Amino acid sequence: MLHFVQIRGGAVRLASFIVACGLFAGDAAMAQADSGALLDRAIELRIAGRADEGREILSQALDAARSENRADRESLAHIVLGDLERGEGETEAARNAYQAAIDIIRDKGVKPGEAGALMSLGYLEFEQGGLKQAMNAFAAANTLYGDSRDVAGGARAMLGLAQAGFARGGTAGVESNLQTALRLARLAENDVTEGRVLMMLGELALRSGAYEEALSYHDDALRIFTPIQFHSGIGSAGLLFGAVETVRGDFDAARIGLKSAVTAFTVEEDARGLSRALARIGDLEYAIGSIDAARDAYLRAGVTAQSVKDRHGEALALLGYGRTERMRGRFNEAGNAYLRAQTLFGETQDPVGLVPASVELGDLLVDVGNYEVARLSYDTARDVAGDNRDRIDEQVGLAGEAAAVAGLGRLEIALGNTEAALTAFDTAIALYEVAGLAAEADGLRQTVGELAP
């Protein structure tokens, strides 16, 4: 019998893969000892959100599995416990549970089972911003899936690798991993994984400015998700559609897409997805000048992220909230939001978020005359962008470094150092040109022209 556990955060995780993966020898139909019944009950409690009762039942299941000498059920109990703790935001407890499952399964030499537990651990690290750790877990899982010729598992592992690489701001290797994942998912006839890969290809196309290609991937994924009512996928499709249409300036269409994402993630009880949908609604409202509506959306996004201890989602919400408060002239609130976003982006190892948070904090500090700390913030942004060129997209890194150097130029203007400002702007223009961002370079040229004697 297979059990699927619905965990808060939208992930639908295989909680019992004994039969599907053939983890241990023996007839699964005979597996009906007390530990099995206890696991069934624990899964039901997890789905119902009754975490304390679930922990108690899982403790009994672990004891029963050990007394029965059923390592398969013991490892499964740890995975279910990890999912439970993860859903409650108890990261360290979840990490320990997944690691215990890995250790037990590894001792039995069952590669598909170990790979499955590594995937759970990988996504936990991914959600917490431990992208390097996540990539290591996904890579190890991929090797084990390959050794056991598990095509569907290989597709999921390659997708995980691509997602972590994308989150680090990179493109090198991401598309290759996604194409491999797509081929394996189709070979395994795994529709959900295929749809998720198509969504990631759409996100990659969006990042590179290929908007029509992004929408094509969106349509292909939605044709998979809609008939099977895969709400997490439908929500992700709404996010992608909304982001594309926001960039293209069709705000009405973008709002429709983002509202569909909110609905889907709400049905799925996916707090992480819902937080991101609300943050993108904030981005949309900010883009059209509806500052109060944007502020409300960012606040809701932040509260939602905090409810599941999603630090990266909270950082994204705080970055947007800081922008709205700065626009409203509430500089203390804006500064605190930027500072907290800086901290969270740093903790979650996200240079793509840390750079704009640092630049915008610097801009705010220049506005209020705190020049010394503004310089530190700009220097942080410049160093982070420059030091992480090997792990983020080249254009993203160059643009971030250029924005930081341009900020230093504005600081020098405020200090009355025109020559130093011109030098900084020239450097920023060169970086923007290398990044292929002509509009940004032209905007700075205009500033230089106004400053030149």
Image (spheres, grey):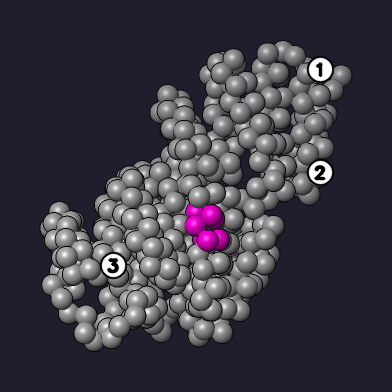
Q: Position of residue 175 (x, y in %)?
A: 66, 65
User: Which residue type carries mark 2?
Assistant: Glu
The crowd level at tag 3 (other Cα within 10 Å; few <14, some 14-19, many 20+) is some
Question: Residue beneath label 3, please?
Answer: 71
Residue at 79% across, 36% down: 429
Q: Nearer the N terminus, badge 3 or badge 1?
A: 3
Q: Position of residue 114 (x, y in %)?
A: 42, 65
Q: Circle 2 sits in a helix, a strand or a loop, which is it?
A: helix
Question: Residue 451: in sight, yes or no?
Answer: yes
Q: Nearer the N terminus, badge 2 or badge 3?
A: 3
Residue at 61% across, 79% down: 183
Mark 3 to mark 1 CA distance (whole Å): 71 Å
Within the image, what quadrant is residue 29 found in?
Answer: bottom left
Residue at 81% across, 17% down: 419
Q: Position of residue 54 (x, y in %)?
A: 17, 60
Front residue of 183 and 299: 183
Q: Nearer the viewer, mark 3 or mark 1?
A: 3
Give me the disc on residue 419.
1
Within the image, what quadrant is residue 107 found in?
Answer: bottom left
Label 2 close to label 3 by CB (< 8 Å): no
Q: Is residue 135 magenta?
A: yes
Q: Circle 1 sits in a helix, a strand or a loop, which is it?
A: helix
Residue 338, placed above or below residue 146: above
User: Which residue type carries mark 1?
Assistant: Glu
Mark 2 to mark 3 CA distance (whole Å): 59 Å
Question: Residue beneath label 2, please?
Answer: 433
Front residue of 368 and 133: 133
Label 1 close to label 2 by CB (< 8 Å): no
Residue range of the region highlighted in magenta in the rendering? 134-140
Q: Position of residue 363 (x, y in %)?
A: 59, 27
The crowd level at tag 1 (other Cα within 10 Å; few <14, some 14-19, many 20+) is some
User: Which residue type carries mark 3?
Assistant: Ala
